[in-house]
Amino acid sequence: TPWYDGPSVMEYLESVEVSAPAQNRSFRMPVQWVNRPSREFRGFAGLIASGVISAGEKIRVLPSGMESTVEKIVTWDGDLSMAGAGRTVTLTLADEIDISRGDVITKTDNPCQTGDQFRCRILWMDSKSMSPGREYLLKSNTQITSMTLGKLKHKIDVNTLEEIPATSLDMNEIGVCNISLSKRIAFDAYDDDPSMGGFIVIDRIS
């Protein structure tokens, strides 16, 4: 863009120590913390999960869909003109919009999806068997919400990849089921972006 006189995108990618696949994906930054030390400053801090962002670019916040423009990219060592995957930054925006922990900042021209119903592959890692119909917590990046496991469709033989009829999963077994969330979250398909397509199932009690 005409106003930008910093390094090119390729020069920037060569200067950071993050795998090329993460840098080349669409921009995603889950908000970890709203930084407001005074009335004059309001920024949104987090680890850039994938992609690259530059000052002056238009962004969209999900799942709300609100849009603005990146005013500054703030770090402990000073402001940056560009930052990418693996970098922890604070973004300040040109507009006062409502953003909180768990929201995901994307670019307006390539946002991720949002939803509250999913078909998922699950690797069960608890000594207690999976309980379809039970309520758990789902954690995806900084997003946390209540989740209900649906009926197991099948489990997968890790040696042959055969789909085997099953009603539950035991420790270290992999299966496919539907899940329902209590609110919409921002996501990408795991094959497109593992940082946005992976999640952890948490037992509320244990």
Image (cartoon, rainbow, N blue to C red):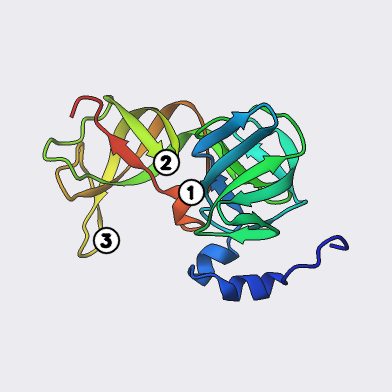
Residue at mark 3: 161
The image shows residue 96 at horizontal and vertical percentages of 73, 29
Residue at mark 1: 196
Picture layout, residue 160 above or below residue 202: below
Residue at the extreme right: 2
Single out the mark in the foreground, 3 or 1.
Answer: 1
Which three-letter amino acid code belongs to the residue tagged 1?
Met
Location of residue 61 (image quadrant): top right
> In the image, which disc is placed on residue 31?
none
Which of 80 and 107 lies nearest the eye of the viewer? 80
The image shows residue 77 at horizontal and vertical percentages of 57, 56
Circles 3 and 1: CB distance less than 8 Å? no
Q: Residue at x 38, y 33 (%)?
A: 179
Q: CA distance from mark 3 to mark 1?
A: 24 Å
Comes first in the chain, label 2 or label 3: 2
Which three-letter amino acid code belongs to the residue tagged 2?
Ser
Q: Residue at x 59, y 39 (%)?
A: 44
Residue at mark 2: 140
Q: As drawn, is 140 to the left or to the right of 70?
A: left
Which three-letter amino acid code belongs to the residue tagged 3?
Leu
Circles 2 and 1: CB distance less than 8 Å? yes
Q: As drawn, is 101 to the left or to the right of 122?
A: right
